[in-house]
Each structure stands twice: as structure tokens, then as C-alpha cells.
Image: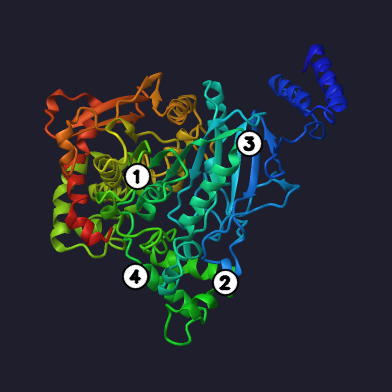
């Protein structure tokens, strides 16, 4: 029971708050914070919502409050992309002077499939084209002029799924940990157009520069942050873009956008499990065919020219729910289970002038952006069918995406991943009837989609003077809080699967869906998030008060002329030590490696990624 002292404090707070809150909002905040500190629940009527007034534009934002964190949600950065604005570049929002923005509730998710995706993600229900909004989370009571560094998060989901409002991306833990470590930050999550609405293409779309709408949305949101975040207490010149999966790959595309001539509205980047590489064939032909197929099904092709302006104008008249249901069904049938790789960024000679790998190597990139890039130990686990048991099934695990690979390329891949090297991973009593071929396919998928593109992008970014050697860092994440969830789903073989690093980076202490919220895992989350927060604040990632060595430490200047690095320094998260730095070289003597170095060496990053990033495979993949 509350003590008499506690009751007196509660009554005092209630009376003073009621008397003064209407006149002195700052005093209201002090008393509310004290109540939270002492575990006292106040009536909601006594708690004033956080407000932000942009005095330059005469706009007020009214948000909501959770313990220690101010939230502002559903803030539109662009006009509703409907009618003539469907597929078109976003039109920035300009609220009328005197506007009061209700930012108390989450905004709609951009058009996508509804229902349950994974046990630890949100149920998708609220879908609308009017979705170009962002959410802001900041430490309680930050004032204009404090100029805190800003994190802008680009969610993943294969350009088919996701929202800034998904519980997977709850920012409270990150914001609170930043305050606890004495380095507070402001968090911004953004929604951008997905699937057909975000990445449809055609001849008419290319000619009128109405392509890659999802990427243009992201840039528009980042520009909104640049132009408006100061009112929320943020520093527009200290913005770190963080993306996971395709969100990370998209950050890379922004660094290659407009041939590098228009800069980017962020100063640093964290690219988690993604970079432009073999992720998707950037040639627009496949996506144009998928667009034409949808246009035909809704009756928008009546002159046999699916690429015409007339077809484009017709597509703008079709109800959004009709297009959503049709395109999601088509995408998931072609690319099960989520529809990834059906609509995605393509070359349009405007935002993206050529193949990403060629733009990168030609130095057509935005320079001066320090980068942390990463992958997860078993990033490719859910892309490999559990029944994989032959060479052909291993190759089929990515055949839908990389459909132009030659016989010699396929043979070389199989040689680089001999099945016997994966025998030790088989756990018959735990995983069920899973063969070494499954783990072989999973590792191959990991390297093709995530690890090797990350290494390719960072190495070539440094080579072509995008960043100094001392401005690029790498980490491998080898821990997961989803083990009990994967067991319940019947997929324990996924291990440290894709998405596993998100709750550590965001320091989410209370995952749902049966995830592991043990003290040890939460402490690792604090370790990882502190490292990222350190980078956001100082430009240098730190782990346990120690700075990481940069990725290409010890590489001589003349070695920068090589196609591939001969040495890698990687921060490894997970295991007994929580964080350990590993350096591996192409010519290492395995007898002198530590346990962790030996584990990283087993991944054969040098010979495998040298081939996966080779001109031969890049040409055949169309990247």
C-alpha cells in the first residue's frame, strides 16, 4: 500500500498541477515527471500534452506523453498522393499559418497487405494512400534551440510491407538509453509509398519523371526533417539516417541518386543488413512488365500500349483498394510469402541514372558521409526453403530473383559453398528433418542479399573517395531475442535471422509475441544501442566505452586499388562477451585465430564475396 508520505505527495501534485497547469505548462511537466519518478499515476486530465510551436511557420503540434518520452505522430510531410499525385513525386505539405496539428495518434500505413505478418510485429489494419507521414519521439520536455542530434529511421519490408508505426520500431528504449548515457537524441520514423504505389514504372512514367516514388518520399521526409526539426529541439545539420534491409539499401541508393550531384539531407548513415548490390535487378523491364500486367487486369490498356500516358492516367482513376488487393495478391503469388522483389527501385535516368554497382565504381556518388554497415549472422535463413536437400534446390532458393545466372556462375557458387562445410550446423533433435543443404542455401542467400553487398558498397565507397578509410565501420550481429518465437512458429532453424538486430539497435526492452526479454538480452540491447548513439552524437561508434577500429584498418593506400580488401575489422555483437572486435585477413593462419575470429573466418568472406561482387555475377544479376 502507498505510504502516508506518498499519499500526501500525490495530493499535493494533483492540487498544484490543477491550479498551475493552465498558466505554467513547464510546472505541469515538473510535477508530472515527479509523479512518474515516484510511481504515482495521475488522472489523464491533469497531464498537459506536449506541444511544439514552430514560430517561424506559426504552426503548433500537439503530441502525447509516455514515461520520459514525448511523441508526435501522423505529421504529414507531403500532400495526399491520390488522383493526379498518384505515382508522382511528393508535394511538400505547407500548413496554413495558425494551424494546430493533432499529432497524438499513429497515422495510416501505406497500401499493403493487411493481417498478421510475424508474431512480434503489428497487426496491419489501418491502410490508406494518405500515408506520407512521420513520427517523432524525443526526451520529455526538450526545448527549441537545444539542437539534439537526430536519428531518421527507414523501415525495411522489401518495399512491400511496413510502417513507422509498427511496434517493431518502438523508439522509446533508444530515446531513454540516449538520455541515460548523457547523449540525448531525437528519433524520427517515416512512412513512404510501397509496392505498386511506390515503385510502378513504365515508359510514360520514366518520360514524365514519375518513378521511384517511394525513394522520392524518403528524400522528401528527410528534407522535412532538415527544414522543421529545429522546432522540436533537433539539429538539422546532425542527422543520421538508419535503415534496415531495403531501408539500408535505399540509403545506399540515396548516396548514388542524381549521379551524386544533389547531395543528401543527412550527414551520417547506418546501413543494417542491406546495401545496393545483388538485392534487386535495377533494370526497369521486369517491374514495367509487372506494372503493365496490373494495368491490363484493371482495364487500363485499351490501345495495346500499356506504357502510354493514357494507361498511366487511367491507373490514377482506379480505387486504391482495388489496386492494393490486386497488386498484393499478384506480388505474393510471384514472390511468396511477402511479395518482395515484384515492385522495387529501378533505373529511370533521373533519380537513378544507371546500375548502382556501376555508379558506385564510377564515383557518381554523394561524398563525405560516414557509414556504419552490418549484417546478421543468419540473415538468409528465411529465404531458404526448409526442405532444401539438393544442389538444384539450393540454387532455386534465389532463382526467382537471379534468373539470368549462367551455368558457370551457378557451378562456382556451389563450389564456394560445399555442403560438407555445413554438416556441423544440423541439429536433428531440435530443428527436425533439416539437411546441411538448407544451411548451405541460407548462407548463400545471406551473402548474396546482405553481407557481400555491404562489403561491396563500403569498399567501393571508400575507394571512390565517398568517405575516408577512417569513416567506415562494420559489425556482424550474432544474437537474437526471437528464439522462442521461432520455436513456436516451427522454424527453429532460422537461428539469428533477418530482423534480429532491430530490437538491440532500438533497445526495445519489452518485445511481444513471446520474444526473449531476459536481463542478459536487454543488457546486450543497451550495449548495441549505446554504440549507435555514440556514432549519432560524435561520429564514432563506441562499445563499452571503447571506440571501434574502422573497417579497413591497416590497409595500405596502394591496396585501395584492389577490387577487394585483404583485411577486415568487424565488431561482433553477441556471445559471452557481448561485443568483441575481430580482424581477419585473406592470408590468415587459422592456428593463430581466437574462437570468434575462427567463427568469422569460417564464413569465407574473402573468396565468396570476391566472386559474388565480381563483374561476371553483377552483370548477370543486372545490378
Which of the marked residues, 1 or 4, is nearer the chain's N terminus? 4
In this rendering, is residue 446 above or below 37? below
Of tags 2 and 1, the one toward the viewer is 2
Asked which colour scheme the image uses, the reply is rainbow
Earlier sequence position, callout 4 versus callout 3:
3
What residue sits right under mark 4 in the picture?
285
Give the quarter of the figure containing the N terminus: top right
Identify the residue under disc 2. 322
> Which numbered disc flags the more N-terminal residue, 3 or 2?
3
Q: Which marked residue is nearer to the observer: mark 1 or mark 3?
A: 3
What secondary structure is marked by label 4?
helix
At label 3, counting other C-alpha atoms closer than 10 Å, the crowd grade (few under 14, some 14-19, many 20 or more) is many
Residue 152: x and y in percent read 51, 41
Label 1 crowd bin: few (<14), some (14–19), many (20+), radius 10 Å? many
The mark nearer the N terminus, 2 or 1, is 2
C-alpha distance separating marks 4 and 3: 43 Å
Ranked by sequence position, the earlier of labels 4 and 2 is 4
The residue at the point 65 percent across, 38 percent down is 71
Q: Which residue is mark 1?
A: 379
Residue 403: x, y in percent? 26, 64
In this picture, is 65 found above or below 422?
above
Residue 418: in sight, yes or no?
no
Which residue is denoted by mark 3 in the rendering? 232
**Viewer-nearest of discs 1 and 4:** 4
Mark 4 or 2: in front is: 4
- Work out which quarter of the rendered image holds the C terminus and state it: bottom left
CB within 8 Å, label 4 to label 2:
no
**Sequence-earlier tag: 1 or 3:** 3
Identify the secondary structure beneath mark 1. loop
Amino acid at each position: 500500500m502507498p505510504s502516508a508520505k506518498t499519499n500526501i505527495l500525490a495530493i499535493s501534485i494533483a492540487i498544484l498541477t490543477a491550479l498551475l497547469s493552465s498558466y505554467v505548462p513547464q510546472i505541469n511537466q515538473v510535477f508530472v515527471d515527479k509523479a512518474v519518478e515516484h510511481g504515482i499515476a495521475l488522472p489523464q486530465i491533469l497531464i498537459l500534452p506536449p506541444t511544439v510551436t514552430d514560430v517561424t511557420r506559426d504552426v503548433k503540434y500537439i503530441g502525447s506523453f509516455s514515461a520520459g518520452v514525448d511523441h508526435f505522430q501522423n505529421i504529414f510531410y507531403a500532400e495526399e498522393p491520390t488522383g493526379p499525385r498518384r505515382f508522382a513525386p511528393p508535394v511538400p505539405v505547407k500548413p496554413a499559418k495558425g494551424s494546430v496539428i493533432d499529432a497524438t495518434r499513429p497515422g495510416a500505413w501505406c497500401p499493403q497487405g493487411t493481417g498478421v505478418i510475424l508474431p512480434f510485429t503489428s497487426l496491419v489494419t489501418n491502410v490508406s494512400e494518405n500515408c506520407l507521414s512521420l513520427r517523432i519521439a524525443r526526451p520529455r520536455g526538450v526545448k527549441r534551440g537545444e539542437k539534439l542530434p537526430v536519428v531518421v529511421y527507414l523501415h525495411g519490408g522489401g518495399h512491400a510491407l511496413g510502417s513507422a508505426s509498427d511496434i517493431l520500431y518502438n523508439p522509446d528504449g533508444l530515446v531513454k538509453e540516449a538520455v541515460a548515457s548523457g547523449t540525448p537524441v531525437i528519433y524520427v520514423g517515416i512512412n513512404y509509398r510501397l509496392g505498386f504505389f511506390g515503385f510502378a514504372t513504365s515508359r510514360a512514367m520514366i518520360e514524365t519523371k514519375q518513378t521511384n516514388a517511394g525513394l522520392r518520399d524518403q528524400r522528401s521526409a528527410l528534407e522535412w526533417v532538415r527544414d522543421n526539426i529545429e522546432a522540436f529541439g533537433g539539429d538539422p545539420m546532425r542527422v543520421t539516417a538508419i535503415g534496415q534491409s531495403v531501408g539500408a539499401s535505399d540509403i545506399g541508393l540515396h548516396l548514388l541518386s542524381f549521379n551524386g550531384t544533389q547531395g543528401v539531407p543527412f550527414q551520417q548513415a547506418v546501413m543494417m543488413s542491406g546495401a545496393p548490390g545483388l538485392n534487386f535487378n535495377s533494370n526497369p523491364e521486369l517491374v514495367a512488365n509487372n506494372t503493365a500486367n496490373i494495368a491490363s487486369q484493371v482495364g487500363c490498356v485499351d490501345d495495346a500500349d500499356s506504357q502510354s500516358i493514357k494507361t498511366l492516367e487511367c491507373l490514377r482513376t482506379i480505387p486504391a483498394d482495388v489496386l492494393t488487393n490486386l497488386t498484393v495478391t499478384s506480388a505474393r503469388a510471384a514472390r511468396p510469402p511477402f511479395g518482395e522483389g515484384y515492385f522495387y527501385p529501378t533505373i529511370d535516368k533521373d533519380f537513378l541514372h544507371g546500375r548502382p554497382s556501376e555508379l558506385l565504381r564510377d564515383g557518381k556518388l554523394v561524398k563525405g558521409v560516414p557509414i556504419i554497415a552490418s549484417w546478421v549472422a543468419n540473415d538468409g535463413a528465411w529465404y531458404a526453403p526448409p526442405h532444401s536437400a539438393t544442389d538444384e534446390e539450393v540454387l532455386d532458393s534465389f532463382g526467382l530473383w537471379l534468373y539470368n545466372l549462367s551455368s558457370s556462375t551457378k557451378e562456382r557458387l556451389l563450389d564456394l559453398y560445399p555442403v560438407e562445410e555445413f554438416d556441423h550446423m544440423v541439429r536433428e533433435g531440435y530443428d527436425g528433418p533439416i539437411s546441411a543443404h538448407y544451411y548451405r542455401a541460407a548462407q548463400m542467400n545471406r551473402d548474396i542479399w546482405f553481407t557481400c553487398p555491404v562489403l561491396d558498397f563500403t569498399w567501393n565507397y571508400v575507394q571512390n573517395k565517398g568517405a575516408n578509410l577512417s569513416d567506415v565501420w562494420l559489425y556482424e550481429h550474432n544474437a537474437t531475442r526471437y528464439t522462442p518465437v521461432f520455436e513456436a512458429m516451427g522454424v527453429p532453424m532460422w537461428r539469428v535471422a533477418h530482423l534480429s538486430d532491430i530490437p538491440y539497435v532500438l533497445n526495445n526492452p519489452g518485445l511481444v509475441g513471446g520474444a526473449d526479454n531476459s536481463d542478459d538480452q536487454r543488457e546486450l540491447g543497451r550495449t548495441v544501442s549505446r554504440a549507435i548513439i555514440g556514432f549519432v552524437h560524435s561520429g564514432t561508434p563506441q562499445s563499452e566505452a571503447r571506440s571501434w577500429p574502422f573497417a579497413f584498418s591497416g590497409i595500405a593506400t596502394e591496396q585501395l586499388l584492389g577490387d577487394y580488401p585483404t583485411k577486415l575489422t568487424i565488431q561482433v555483437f553477441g556471445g559471452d562477451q557481448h561485443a568483441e572486435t575481430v580482424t581477419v585477413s585473406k592470408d590468415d593462419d587459422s592456428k593463430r585465430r581466437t574462437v570468434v575470429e575462427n567463427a568469422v573466418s569460417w564464413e569465407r568472406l574473402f573468396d565468396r564475396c570476391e566472386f559474388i561482387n565480381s563483374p561476371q555475377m553483377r552483370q548477370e544479376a543486372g545490378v
